[in-house]
């Protein structure tokens, strides 16, 4: 059962543009909605996360928008830079499973100079 | 405060052999989880350890086993290695019941 759908699978954005990655989920027990960033050959790094009682969270150029009723959340990267080129994973989790992370294939972002 | 460290960084083993991977959790973290990431895929949850006991397991066979020590460091053991076990093995540490997990750099295992 696929509980999380992330889109697009890949994304190419010009430097300075806005990158938008979307995530839709089914499990209403999720109460933590993070985005992880992974560079090739490295471990994933927690980038930004949100709880369901907040609709938006901004940290620098990165913003999470959360729509509880639609069961969707998205990552916006403003002023995208070539150094942002990485794979991004939305990995909502639940206390019912000890917050074990169930990764999908993620979104491969390429920011061109 | 130190982050999550894993050793070794790279390893080559022969099919049928056994391997042990090691992880030191971030200072103060008492929960360790292990993940397997095949090339081009997202990490897959293997199991989680808390208080030296397995606290949840993904869809992996029993030849994948682990240990957690009193200092919260952990080992992942894989017996009877298969070619498909070639992957990046990731360790993540966290506090019990906290959703924030921090990953190490991983161990790249190649089975030939």
Image: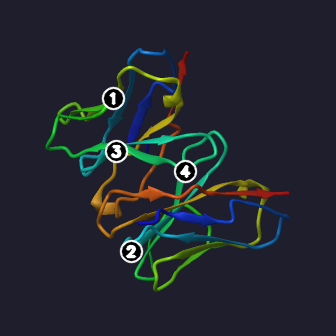
Secondary structure category for the residue under label 1: loop
Residue tagged by mark 1? A61
How dense is the environment of label 3, judged by Cα within 10 Å: few (below 14), some, or many (20 and up)? many
Residue A109 appears anywhere in the view: no
| Residue B87 vertical position relative to residue A96 in the rendered view, above or below | above
Q: CA distance from mark 4 to mark 3?
A: 15 Å
Numbered disc in front, either 4 or 3:
4
Determine if marks 2 and 1 fall on one subunit: no
Q: CA distance from mark 3 to mark 1?
A: 16 Å
Marker disc for residue A94: none
Determine if marks 2 and 3 fall on one subunit: no
Q: CA distance from mark 1 to mark 4?
A: 22 Å
Quick check: B101 left or right of A42? left
**Residue at x 51%, y 76% (from the top left corner):** B73
Image position, residue B24 (x, y; %): 53, 71
Residue tagged by mark 3? A34
Q: Quadrant of residue A40?
A: top right
Determine if marks 1 and 4 fall on one subunit: yes
| Residue B51 vertical position relative to residue A28 in the rendered view, above or below | below
Residue tagged by mark 4? A43
Asked whether B84 or B75 is in front, the reply is: B75
Numbered disc in front, either 2 or 1:
1
């Amino acid at each position: 059962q696929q509980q999380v759908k992330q889109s697009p699978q890949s994304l190419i954005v010009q430097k300075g543009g806005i990158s938008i990655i979307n995530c839709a989920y089914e499990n209403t027990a999720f109460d933590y909605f993070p985005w992880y960033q992974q560079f090739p050959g490295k471990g994933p790094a927690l980038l930004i996360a949100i709880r369901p009682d907040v609709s938006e969270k901004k940290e620098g150029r990165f913003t999470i928008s959360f729509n509880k009723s639609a069961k969707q959340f998205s990552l916006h990267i403003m002023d995208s830079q070539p150094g942002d080129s990485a794979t991004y994973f939305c990995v909502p989790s639940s206390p019912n499973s000890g917050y074990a992370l169930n990764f999908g294939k993620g979104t491969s972002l390429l920011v061109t100079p | 405060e130190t982050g999550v460290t894993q050793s070794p960084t790279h390893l080559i083993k022969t099919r049928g052999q056994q391997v042990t991977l090691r992880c030191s959790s971030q200072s103060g973290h008492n929960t360790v989880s292990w993940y397997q990431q095949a090339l081009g895929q997202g990490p897959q949850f293997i199991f989680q350890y808390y208080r030296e006991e397995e606290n949840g397991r993904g869809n992996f066979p029993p030849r994948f086993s682990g240990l957690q020590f009193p200092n919260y460091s952990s080992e992942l053991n894989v017996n009877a290695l298969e070619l498909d076990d070639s992957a990046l093995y990731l360790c993540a540490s966290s506090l019990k019941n906290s959703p924030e997990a921090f990953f190490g750099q991983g161990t790249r295992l190649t089975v030939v």
